[in-house]
Each structure stands twice: as C-alpha cells, then as structure tokens.
Amino acid sequence: MTSLTAQTTCPHFEMAKPRGLSQTLTSWIALARQRRALAMLDDHLLRDIGVTRADALQEARKPVWEHPANAGK
C-alpha cells in the first residue's frame, strides 16, 4: 500500500520595520493607499473577504501611523 502526503504552505509576509524617514513615509503612503482601496470596495467584495462596510470605513479612517503590525503592542 502506498500513501501520498501533500502539504502546502502560505507565505507569511510582515512589513519590515522602517529603518529611516524615507522608508517610514513610503510605508505610510502604501498603507494609506491600501486603506483607501479597502474603503472603495463594493459590498459584495467586502463580504467575500469577510469585512463589513462599517469595518472597512473604520479601518480607512485610521491615521497612517496606526499600523496593523503595531496592534496590541
């Protein structure tokens, strides 16, 4: 009898800690764009990713220095 095992992994990406002002600003600009894009998604796309309209708007209103990687710290 032969057994076959398959394993898949999903890479985990974390934003690197910015090392300087330029990297910090670049990171903040990217985060602002992502939050703006999230707020612009229509309701069926938000449902697809398990986010309510209220949650999306709440996230979009956060200041850029309030970074998700810093949550709970």
Image (spheres, rainbow, N blue to C red):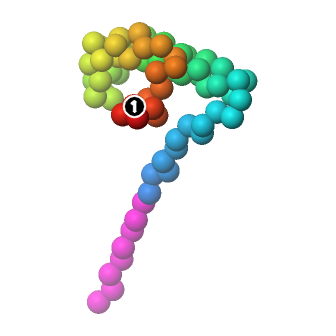
Dot 1: element = loop
Q: Quadrant of residue 23?
A: top right
How many numbered marks are there?
Answer: 1
Q: Quadrant of residue 5?
A: bottom left
Residue 45 counted in the magenta span: no
Measuring 43% from the left and 18% from the top, which residue is drawn there? Answer: 38
The answer to whether any part of residue 2 appears in the image is yes
Position of residue 31 relative to residue 9, above or below, is above
Q: Position of residue 10 (x, y in %)?
A: 45, 51
Q: Which residues are magenta?
A: 1-8
Measuring 35% from the left and 21% from the top, which residue is drawn there? Answer: 45
User: For this rendering, which residue is in front, 71 or 52?
Assistant: 71
Residue lying at the far front in this picture: please name it.
73
The residue carrying mark 1 is 71
Q: Position of residue 9 (x, y in %)?
A: 44, 57
Residue lying at the far bottom in this picture: please name it.
1
User: For this rendering, which residue is in front, 45 or 32?
Assistant: 32
Question: Amino acid under label 1?
Answer: Ala
Measuring 48% from the left and 26% from the top, which residue is drawn there? Answer: 67
User: For this rendering, which residue is in front, 48 or 20?
Assistant: 20
- Badge 1, how many Cα within 10 Å: few under 14, some, many 20+? few
The answer to whether any part of residue 42 appears in the image is no
Using residue 44 as the reference point, say whether residue 23 is left or right of it.
right
Q: Quadrant of residue 51?
A: top left
Q: Where the N terminus falls, by quadrant?
A: bottom left
Residue 3 counted in the magenta span: yes
Q: Where the C terminus falls, by quadrant?
A: top left
Q: Main secondary structure of the magenta part?
A: loop
Q: Position of residue 69 (x, y in %)?
A: 46, 34
Measuring 34% from the left and 13% from the top, which residue is drawn there? Answer: 58
